[in-house]
Amino acid sequence: MSTDDRFTTCLWFDDQAEEAAEYYLSVFRNSRLGRIGRYTEAGPGPAGSVLAVEFELNGQKFVGLNGGPLFKFNESVSFQIPCADQAEIDYYWSRLTEGGQESQCGWLKDRYGVSWQVVPTALIEMIADPDPEKARRTTEAMLRMGKFDLAALERAYAGE
């Protein structure tokens, strides 16, 4: 039986797990580095090179695994970052798109190909509003955006 019942997300990297962990630690303020496991003479990686690195971002546990080039990240899995205000949206968007790629509706890929959604916490309330017109206007505005503009979403929601 496990002593910790939280899930740990394993991210498969070619050989950048430690570099990626250090990068994520610099982006997320509430983060920490855990243990680093290294390959031994048993392989399959070069002895002494990083096999896996534990890290935690905002309470979410991760393991970065250097598994080689067999698998790549894609948009079918992403990590949602709830943001209280535009300053948080701007911060995470600018940091995570450095060397990455912007997409639409708050989605982006970071420099390692990991997909993130930088989302205002108020968005779900707006698009799930029982007033179908408010939800429609907000959704239409959302679908035209890359990085979210919280003020524009709020104006659409209000019918302005």
Image (cartoon, rainbow, N blue to C red):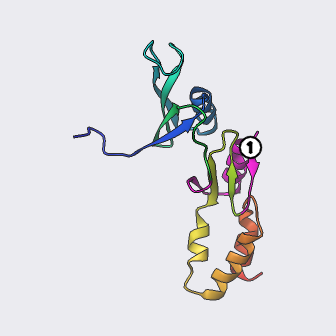
In which quadrant of the rendered view does residue 120 lie? bottom right
**Picture coordinates of residue 111 (x, y %)?**
70, 39
Quadrant where the C terminus lies?
A: bottom right
Foreground: 53 or 125? 53
Q: Is residue 30 left or right of residue 157?
A: left
The single residue placed furthest to the left in the displayed view is: 1
Q: Is residue 151 left or right of residue 56?
A: right
In which quadrant of the rendered view does residue 121 lie? bottom right
Decide: few, some or many residues near mark 1? Use Cα within 10 Å; few <14, some 14-19, many ≥20: some
Q: Amino acid at mark 1?
A: Gly
Foreground: 45 or 23? 45
- Please tell me which residue is depicted at 54% across the width and 38% down the height of the picture: 12
**Picture coordinates of residue 96 (x, y %)?**
69, 44
Q: Is residue 59 left or right of residue 84?
A: left
Q: Is 140 placed above or below 63 here?
A: below
- Please tell me which residue is depicted at 49% across the width and 22% down the height of the picture: 44
- Please tell me which residue is depicted at 74% across the width and 45% down the height of the picture: 97
In which quadrant of the rendered view does residue 28 lie? top right
**Picture coordinates of residue 32 (x, y %)?**
50, 31
Foreground: 76 or 94? 76
**Picture coordinates of residue 137 (x, y %)?**
71, 81
Q: Is residue 91 magenta?
A: yes
Q: Is 39 placed above or below 55 here?
A: above
Q: Which residues are magenta?
A: 75-104
Q: Is residue 40 magenta?
A: no
Quadrant where the N terminus lies?
A: top left
Residue to which mark 1 is pinned: 100
Callout count: 1
